[in-house]
Amino acid sequence: MRTQVAIIGAGPAGLTLGRLLETAGIDAVIIEQRSADYVLGRIRAGVLEQSSVDLLRRMGVNQRMDAEGIVHDGVELSFDGDMLRIDFNELIGRRVMVYGQTEVTRDLMDARIASGAKSIYEASDVQIHDFAGETPRVSFTKDGQTHQINCDFVAGCDGFHGVSRASVPDQAISVFERVYPFGWLGVLVDQPPVAEELIYAHHERGFALCSMRSHSRSRYYVQVGATEKAQDWSDEMFWDELRARLNPDIAERLKTGPSIEKSIAPLRSFVAEPLRFGRLFLTGDAAHIVPPTGAKGLNMAIHDVTELATALNEFYGERSKAGIDAYSGKVLENTWRTERFSWWMTQLLHTFPDSGDFGRRIQRADFDYLGASRIAQQSLAENYTGFRP
């Protein structure tokens, strides 16, 4: 098999890149280790920056998003019950949209099926060959048969544990990582959200987040220790802990019920450098991980593949290598800027085992400064909605 671009991974990064290349007339094949149903079964958050919303509209995959997505003008922060609303629209004239990553993936998958573009699911033993030269290839096993795709470029969109970054020699790549000493215990429940916008809460017992998937389905989180197990938390234990960390008026409004999904997500910050290795490019979670505190993971992936699609379009349309040569530097600039913001949100809102009373006083001072300074609020709003210089 021959294609121009082999895309490893059929998550939102790979599917977005595939759609962008398809609309530019560039042939691409997506190779995915898991089944389509498995990919759609992964429950992920979904807060879309305005630029991500605009891109999905330009790609023509916005019908359900515009009908079901929930536009938010701001977020609420809480510190030991004291509330502070950050009004994005009033501060900088931008908004975000709550629309689940699973739904974004479904929309992109449906569009690819409708167009007839090729995707290969349940491909095992995926391997990337000869990407240092000009004739890379991807091999895999499907239905007991070995297959090979010859291509011009390989896009690694297969996540943190995927084969793409693992294919790079250790001496050719540097990694920067911080693993946090806690995780988020999340519960999905079929109840209306407790508030119209997201609530990020700091409490001496730990962080909490009130989020949503729709007007009738809510997602709630509490900070737990890194070694905690979801099965050790009953629904009643979770709701009691969440109420204890929220403003009393909000806790009183909380509607609870049996969880339909419960899991713990570890938190880490991770960046790989560089992001281009000959004809192989890393994108999304294969390139970087951010704590979910700033709602950035999906948006970073969309930004990465937009840059890559632009570079590849330039290569095929103008016979210029300038875009692919600049890809790593441009994406890493945005990556570190976004890592900084997610780190700052995490530092402000979580309790750390070694911070002590001094650390909490610093966090309180940071919260009070944010409440007193319009410029600080504008900075948060700018970064949360997607800063692009």
Image (tube, rainbow, N blue to C red):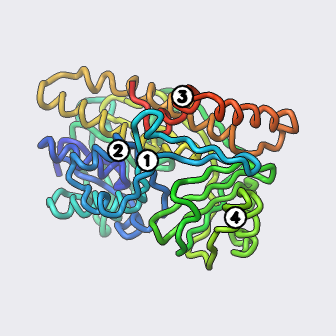
**Upstream in the sequence, badge 4 or badge 2?**
2
Q: Position of residue 161 (x, y in %)?
A: 50, 50
Q: Quadrant of residue 51?
A: top left
Mark 3, Cα crowd under 10 Å, few <14 / some 14-19 / many 20+, is: few
Residue type for callout 3:
Ser
SS assignment at label 3 = strand
Name the residue located 65 percent from the left edge and 37 percent from the top edge: 178
Residue 132 seen in the current view:
yes
Q: Is residue 169 visible?
A: no
Instruction: Give SS at disc 4.
Output: helix
Mark pair 4, 3: CA separation: 45 Å
Tags 4 and 3 touching, CB below 8 Å: no
| Tag nearer the camera, 1 or 4 | 4
The type of residue carrying mark 1 is Leu
Q: Which residue is mark 2?
A: 52
Who's the residue at 62% across and 78% down the image?
257
Please give the residue where the numbered disc 1 appears in the rendered image. Answer: 298
Q: Nearer the viewer, residue 130 or 81?
A: 81
Instruction: Tell which residue pokes out farthest to the bottom in this image.
Output: 258
Quick one: label 1 or label 2, which is nearer the N terminus?
A: 2
Q: CA distance from mark 1 to mark 2?
A: 9 Å
Alpha-carbon span between mark 3 and mark 2: 28 Å
Q: Residues within 10 Å of mark 1 (few under 14, many from 20)?
A: many
Spatial distance from mark 3 to mark 1, Cα to Cα? 23 Å
Residue at the farthest right position: 357
At label 2, the amino acid type is Ser
Identify the mark at residue 174; answer none if there is no mark. Answer: 3
Q: Are marks 1 and 4 in contact (CB under 8 Å)?
A: no
Precedes in sequence: disc 1 or disc 4:
4
Instruction: Answer left or right for 225 relative to 187.
Output: right
| Mark with earlier residue (4, 3) | 3
Residue position for label 4: 251
